[in-house]
Amino acid sequence: MKKCLSFLLVAATVAISLAFCVIMISMISWSLVFLTGALHGFGLAPIPALSFWQSVVAVILLSPLALLAASRRKQQVG
């Protein structure tokens, strides 16, 4: 019984952290959709308005670069 309970706790923790990551990616993607839509509608620069799925791909592709830059910055400071 105790092994089953610990497995369920680990599974619940993984499910919650996965849901948190999905929610954070979707919120960042929606903000990118609104930002590019506003810039496109404003007409100041020729910036295309991105769809939600294009923004998701952009966030997923740019997140490793952001993590790499943050780790390099941390190495320079420390």
Image (cartoon, grey):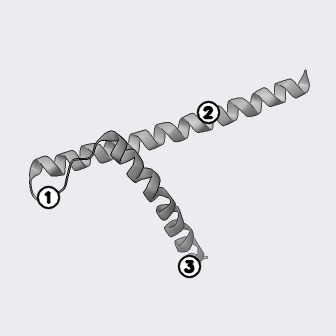
Tag 3's secondary structure? helix
The residue under the point 51% across, 60% down is 64
What's the mark number on residue 67? none
Disc 1 + disc 2, Cβ < 8 Å: no
Q: Is residue 40 left or right of residue 14?
A: left
Residue 44 position, x and y percent, is: 9, 58
Residue 27 position, x and y percent, is: 40, 40
**Label 1, label 2: how far apart the Cα atoms are:** 40 Å
Q: Nearer the viewer, mark 1 or mark 2?
A: 1
Mark 1 or mark 2: name the one nearer the start of the chain: 2
Identify the residue under disc 2.
16
Tag 1's secondary structure? loop
Identify the residue under disc 3.
76
What's the mark number on residue 46? 1
Residue type of the residue flagged with mark 1: Pro
Is residue 38 depicted above or below 78 in this figure?
above
Residue type of the residue flagged with mark 3: Gln
**Label 1, label 3: how far apart the Cα atoms are:** 37 Å
Residue 71 position, x and y percent, is: 56, 68
Residue type of the residue flagged with mark 2: Ile
